[in-house]
Image (cartoon, rainbow, N blue to C red):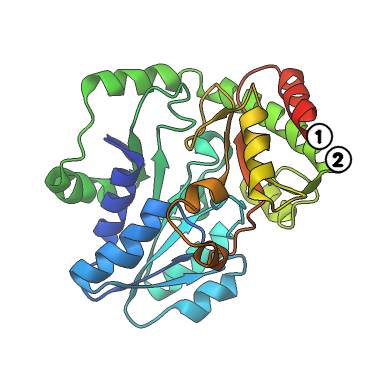
Amino acid sequence: EKAKLVSSGIAAVTSAILHCVKANDHIVTIKNIYGPTNTFISTYLKNKFNITSTFIDGRDVQNFANAIQGNTALIYLESPASLTYDLQDLKAVADLAKSKGIKTAIDNTYSSPIFQKPLDLGIDIEVHSVSKYIGGHSDVVAGVIVSSKSIMDSIIGNEHELLGAKMAPFEGWLVLRSLRTLPIRMKAHQDNGMKIASYLESHHKIEKVFYPGLKSFPQYDLAQRQMSGSSGLLSFELKTKEIAKIKTFVDSLKMFKLGVSWGGHDSLIYAPVISYLKELTPDQFEGFGINPSILRISVGLEHWEDLREDLQRVLA
């Protein structure tokens, strides 16, 4: 294996994808991938290079088999996926892709390299937003690409060199600092995340909790097979769809600060409905299949009982 740090997470994503495709190719990916990645695949590649794409559910390997076309060059994964943390069976998808001569790439940011090792399961390329758990302190914008030496030599000599996704020395130093504590930080994020997820699941004002570490998670068995942990990122649905109440909930929290990023030592909350409705109509938002009452929290490294009390106070 060989790795290359780059200037941002999306730079890692675009470099990895561009390595795998050429004009008029086809990409299979999942519906709820990271927003800028969705835009890059569905719009930029289509408009610039006539690279088409098919967005699927992805929870069943048969979804991928049905979507493959004669010109499919890449299956792009994100497992657990954004917001709802749906999983893809990485080994099954990798085996399917290899049988068809198709490359595979995955955004593995949620798990970090500590809790999931996609290359060991047959995936060709792994990318991370280093700004999240690998950086861990909310003070660096960076990305990383990991693959076999032959693939990485090609990416470094072509896409990385030509796209100019260089990392400055100071950011590189910050990442090296953070790698030294990554294993112990991930364990702490997981411990806090599990306790907060369990608390929310038991609360009568919470409709549903999305967290791969819970036994109630629909794909819990798959999570246990291909992941060794569940980090501190989770989502939950309030038992209300009133935007005013959702805003009040978010604004009333003290420990959970408002922020769209995640993976740092501070706990954060993000309300998709509030962000999306600034740019989309309610009908367009509904088309994403996202319940407006869903909230995402990044459980940080504070004492979990302080976080629980903050949630408890606002829910009351």
- x, y percentage for residue 76? 42, 60
- x, y percentage for residue 29? 45, 65
The quadrant of the rendering that contains the C terminus is top right
Q: Is 45 drawn above or below residue 311 in the view shown?
A: below
User: Is residue 31 in view?
Assistant: no
* Residue at image coords 21%, 25%: 168
- x, y percentage for residue 128? 41, 41
Is 50 left, or right, of 248 in this rendering?
left
Q: Is 230 drawn above or below residue 290 in the view shown?
A: above
Is 215 left, or right, of 169 in this rendering?
right
The quadrant of the rendering that contains the N terminus is top left
Q: Which amino acid type is marked by label 2?
A: Ser
Is the Cβ of the residue at disc 2 closer than 8 Å to that at disc 1? yes
* Residue at image coords 29%, 23%: 172
**Residue ID for mark 2:** 202
Q: Is 247 drawn above or below residue 22 in the view shown?
A: above
Q: Nearer the viewer, residue 136 or 226?
A: 136
**Residue ID for mark 1:** 199
Report helix, strand or loop for mark 1: helix
* Quadrant in which residue 304 is drawn: top right
Q: CA distance from mark 2 to mark 1?
A: 5 Å
